[in-house]
C-alpha cells in the first residue's frame, strides 16, 4: 500500500509581490509573476522572461516546514535550470530562486485565487 503524503500548505498559486534582484515592472513583464504548486508535487512559475516547471518536495529548513524544488525551463528563450526553496510566514511565501550558473533572488509572494492575468500588449 502506498504511503500517504503529508498535507501540503504550499499547494495553490502565489503572486510574486517582491523580488530582491528585479523591480515589479520586470517581474510582471509578460504575466503577473507567480509560483504555482499542485497536489501532484509539481508546479510552475514565471517572472519577467523566466519560466520554469518545478519538481518539489516538502522539507525542513532551520526547524521550519518548507518546500524545496528543482526546475527546468527558459530565460528569454534560452534553456535554463535551477533550484529554489520557500517557507510560509504568516500569509506570505518567502524564499529564494536560483538560476543555475546565473542570478539568484529572494522573493515574497501572496496566495491568490484563480490564474494570474496576462498583461495586455500595447
Image: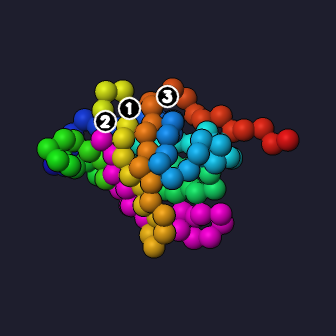
How many residues crowd mark 2 within 10 Å: few (<14), some (14–19), many (20+)?
Answer: some
Which region shows up in magenta?
Answer: 69-88
Along the line of sight, the residue nearer the viewer: 3 or 38? 38
Label 2: element kind: strand
User: Quadrant of the image for the C terminus?
Assistant: top right
Label 3: element kind: strand
Q: Which mark is residue 92?
A: 1
Q: Residue at x 56, y 50 (%)?
A: 22
Mark 3 vs 1, N-terminal side: 1
Main secondary structure found in the magenta portion: strand
**Is residue 55 shown to the viewer in this render?**
no
Q: Which mark is residue 112?
A: 3
Residue 87 percent across, percent down from the top left: 30, 41
Query: Looking at the rendering, which quadrant does residue 38 occupy?
Result: top left
Does the stretch in magenta take in 87?
yes
Along the line of sight, the residue nearer the viewer: 16 or 73? 16
Contact? badges 1 and 2 (CB < 8 Å):
yes
Amino acid at each position: 500500500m502506498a504511503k500517504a503524503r503529508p498535507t501540503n500548505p504550499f499547494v495553490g498559486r502565489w503572486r510574486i509581490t517582491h523580488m530582491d534582484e528585479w523591480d515589479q515592472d520586470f517581474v510582471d513583464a509578460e504575466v503577473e509573476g507567480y509560483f504555482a504548486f499542485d497536489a501532484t508535487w509539481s508546479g510552475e512559475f514565471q517572472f519577467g522572461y523566466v519560466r520554469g516547471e518545478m519538481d518539489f518536495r516538502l522539507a525542513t529548513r532551520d526547524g521550519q516546514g518548507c518546500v524545496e524544488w528543482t526546475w527546468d525551463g527558459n530565460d528569454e528563450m534560452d534553456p535554463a535550470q535551477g533550484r529554489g526553496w520557500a517557507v510560509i510566514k504568516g500569509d506570505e511565501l518567502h524564499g529564494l530562486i536560483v538560476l543555475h550558473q546565473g542570478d539568484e533572488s529572494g522573493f515574497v509572494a501572496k496566495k491568490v485565487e484563480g490564474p494570474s492575468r496576462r498583461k495586455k500588449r500595447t
